[in-house]
Image (cartoon, rainbow, N blue to C red):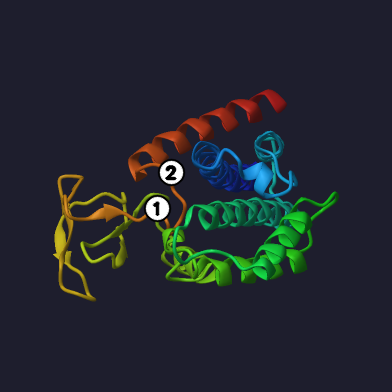
Amino acid sequence: PAVLSDTILEAQLHQVNLFRHIRTLRRIVAELRGRFPDLPLLTNNIISFQGLDRDLRYFERWATQPRTVFTTQNERDSTLEHDRLRLLLSLLKILGLSYIRVEGGRLSDGQKADLITALRDLTAEGRTSSTVVDRCETLVDNLSKLMPESHIALTAQEKMDIVRAVNVSAGAWYQCPNNHIYAIGECGQAMEEARCPECQATIGGTNHRLRDDNARASQMDGADRPVWDNLDADRELAERLQRLEVRVK
């Protein structure tokens, strides 16, 4: 029936978005592993890269289970787990950056103790609570101000609110030559040039080609590839989910 088809489609859209987030988290883990191979030692072995890989595999298996409906509880659980992993990786990056700073950007003993406590809370056995997530979100926002490379001009919550409000495809965020952020709607690719409303620099591009002096702003939504690659990957996942759904019937 039509109602069932609608609920299946909605469930699959949730799964596509989840898979996109997981793909981004995997990229961040790979970046951390390559850049800060000694991170587990810096965390007093609270965290291991193998453990992060395991958590992401488990999350992906859960996210791609055949479903005819994506319940409110499913949505709460997936948001909580995504936030837990995202904050975990943000804290690890801050910790890694603090150890390679020659001047400035280092954590005090108290700040490092707070960070280690947050890592313990985010990796404790059992389901992470929203209270823990909120507390760690605040800590990440505060510590990120010490790390210019973290690209935190906006807080994590502010970025999330903007991305949700604008509602464009992943990978459709860009920045002008002066680093002011903008989004491109519809297909998410540059089709015309315009002026940055903040500094009047030329933004956009033509024929799906971004101007050379503009750049992708992946820090807004965590997209690990251009929008056209995301669309291809999403289409592939949707077809995969459709095959699973057919087998379940």
- Give the position of the C terminus as an image quadrant: top right
Q: Nearer the viewer, residue 85 or 117?
A: 117
- Give the position of the N terminus as an image quadrant: top right
Count of marks, rendered view: 2
Q: What residue did someone put label 1 on? A: 218
Name the element at disc 2.
loop
Q: Nearer the viewer, residue 223 or 92?
A: 92
Q: What residue did someone put label 2 on? A: 224
Q: Residue at x 52, y 35 (%)?
A: 238
Q: Is residue 183 left or right of residue 53?
A: left
Q: Is residue 14 left or right of residue 43?
A: left
**Three-letter code, disc 2:** Asp
Name the element at disc 1.
loop
Is any atom of residue 135 visible in this view? yes
Q: Nearer the viewer, residue 198 or 28?
A: 28
> Mark 1–mark 2 contact, CB under 8 Å?
yes
